[in-house]
Amino acid sequence: NAGVTQTPKFRVLKTGQSMTLLCAQDMNHEYMYWYRQDPGMGLRLIHYSVGEGTTAKGEVPDGYNVSRLKKQNFLLGLESAAPSQTSVYFCASSPDFDEQFFGPGTRLTVL
Amino acid sequence: GENVEQHPSTLSVQEGDSAVIKCTYSDSASNYFPWYKQELGKRPQLIIDIRSNVGEKKDQRIAVTLNKTAKHFSLHITETQPEDSAVYFCAASIGGGNMLTFGGGTRLMVKP
């Protein structure tokens, strides 16, 4: 089992460009999450999904969109990147009310 | 919403000493409290968790205590080793659901 994987690992964008981050899990988990991690601020929840076809806003959703068309995939989109979105992005998945398993992260820099 | 405060932000100990990290939370409905360890450049990984129906849980050198009345929980690491050096995050569930709010992290440095 690969667990939780993320694509790409690194990306540099110019302000105003768009991109999509892909998260995939092979553990048949219902719940999936997107977090951003900034120095000294821990992990902050951007969006989450409680099952295929569902999405919901987390703590810091502005500037991001998500989709969960297949149970195993959770996509995070940036429509018009801003320097404030420079961060490390982690995807996670979990079964009901249990441990969240994290992916390896994507380091995004917006110039 | 839920607010989780974590202290200290940095902690330096000698190898073999104990380390204690404390967190407070605001939502009295929170019922799940995990602790994650994150090594430099790596993903967070669960090291121990506790649910609200338990006051203490131990796993070898690691223990977590929970005081629901005071809304705080703590991570205790005994006989620290250099490989314990990492950033540790506490988290609390938002109400009784699956979503978590994380503390700001504690950078633990174990000096050999």
Image (tube, rainbow, N blue to C red):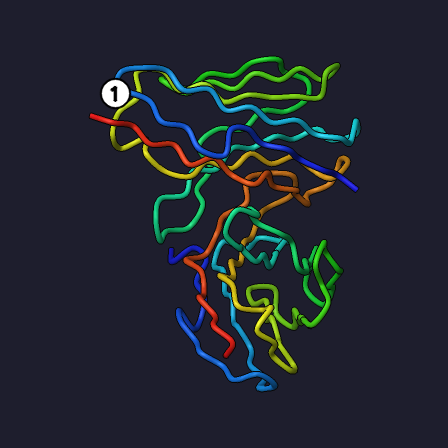
Q: Is residue A58 shown above or below B32?
A: below
Q: Quadrant of residue B80?
A: top left
Q: Is residue A103 shown above or below B25?
A: below
Residue furthest to the left in view is B112
- Secondary structure under tag 1 reads loop
Q: Is residue A19 shown above or below A5?
A: below
Foreground pick, B8 / A102:
B8
In the displayed structure, does residue A109 sit left or right of residue A34?
Answer: left
Identified at 38% across, 32% down, the residue is B108
Residue B46: give x, y in percent of width and height.
Answer: 46, 37
Residue A88: give x, y in percent of width and height.
Answer: 49, 61
What is the tally of numbered marks visible in this picture?
A: 1
Looking at the picture, which amino acid does disc 1 mark? Glu
How many neighbours does mark 1 have within 10 angstroms: few (below 14), some (14-19), or many (20 or more)? some
Residue A58: give x, y in percent of width and height.
Answer: 72, 55
Foreground pick, B20 / A57:
B20
Residue B56: give x, y in percent of width and height.
Answer: 56, 13
In the displayed structure, does residue A51 sit left or right of residue B12?
Answer: right
Identified at 78% across, 31% down, the residue is B27
Q: Is residue B109 shown above or below B52?
A: below
User: What residue is pinned by disc 1?
Assistant: B15
Identified at 62% across, 13% down, the residue is B55
In the displayed structure, does residue A81 sit left or right of residue A58?
Answer: left
Foreground pick, B29 / B102:
B102
Q: Quadrant of residue B107?
A: top left
Identified at 27% across, 16% down, the residue is B16
Q: Chain of mark 1?
A: B
Quadrant where the N terminus of chain A sits is: bottom left
